[in-house]
Amino acid sequence: MKNKIFNIAIVIISSVMLLYFFLYKNGLNQLISVIKIIDTFWLLVAIILMLIYWIFETLIIHELTRLLFSERKFRESIKAAMVGQLFGAITPLQTGAQPAIFYALVERNIDSGSASSILMMKFIIHQTILTVYSFIIIVLKFNYFKSMISYLSYLCLFGFVFNLAIILVAVMFSVNKNFTRGLLLGILKFLNNIKLVKAVDGYKDKIEKNLNDFHNNATLIAKNYKAVIKVAIINTIQLTVFYIIPYCIYRSFKLQSASLWNMLAAQTLVMTIVSITPLPGGIGGAEGGFALLFKAFFKENIFPAIVLWRIITFYSCIGVGVLFSIHLPKNTIKDDEIF
């Protein structure tokens, strides 16, 4: 019940933010005026790119899963990808995506150790590509955007360090069994101290078993470097597809003076800001970052642009993700599968 209330609250807060952009500075009238002249072809391209983004997300999960389960069907990875999109959208820093995908994988008869290793490798690859991608863009286009945001250097530095730190912790978790064991036992001890977990000795045995499975599977995946490179390439294309969506929205407004490269760079920097915004869906950071970096391109159409961008890239994940999560069992995973 608490989780449902939390999720509903997140959707309400996000909707209020959207409503704000409708009403602020006559945004609703602006949106209506834009819709009257909008180029539906470019808007359709933006929607198709979002669909392609979801397909690539499914492909990434599918490719990593097939390294351990060769008979895995593509359609079985679709649900995992979409519930991940939903819970990533409604939780701070997308922290709900991994557990949601974990539940969806276990539901399809994948053991918890394998599911954990699949998700950890996916996370490390994604964060690495995201960090490298952002670093390249920052180096190449920093001076261009610095004139728009005087404190851009601080945001970029903080975002880069934050993502790099996450990668280092994830890698340490994957390759250092003692580190992982100490962390899990520390969490177990804390849960025992606050009376949420009893029979600690029994959990310790389960942690050791699942830890061995996790590291063995993670090592197996990492050694298959061709598949890892393939996933990294897919992830890079996926990010690029997502970053092009604002340009399509821009062209749908029948504007064409801005270059695709500059707008792709702007979107990359927006996502750097979103990654350090500790609110579900990057609420506030996403809209504010988009307004700061894209105002020079959209000018008086910036508020309708924000609304369309959030509908396509954020609310669509919630709407479609809900459809896939409706039949997700509430009690799929037992306590002894968690550790």
Image (cartoon, rainbow, N blue to C red):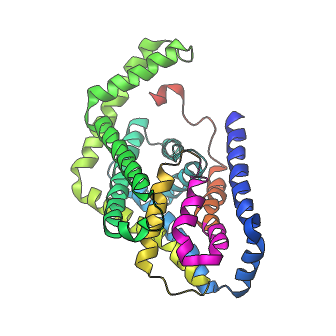
Percent coordinates x, y for residue 301 in the rendering: 65, 76
Horizontal side of residue 196 vs 203, given as left or right: right
Image quadrant where one finds the C terminus? top left
Range shown magenta: 280-309
Q: Is residue 311 visible?
A: yes
Q: Is residue 206 visible?
A: no
104 vs 180, nearest the viewer: 180
Give the residue displayed 72% in from the left and 46% down from the top: 8
Give the residue displayed 48% in from the left and 55% down from the top: 273
Percent coordinates x, y for residue 319 in the rendering: 66, 59
Residue 48 included in the magenta stretch of the image = no
Residue 289 included in the magenta stretch of the image = yes
Image quadrant where one finds the N terminus? top right
Horizontal side of residue 242 vs 70, given as left or right: right
Horizontal side of residue 106 vs 281, given as left or right: left
336 vs 7, nearest the viewer: 7
Percent coordinates x, y for residue 34 in the rendering: 70, 81
Percent coordinates x, y for residue 102 in the rendering: 48, 43
Q: Is residue 55 above or below residue 263?
A: above
263 vs 52, nearest the viewer: 263
Q: Which image quarter: residue 236?
A: bottom left
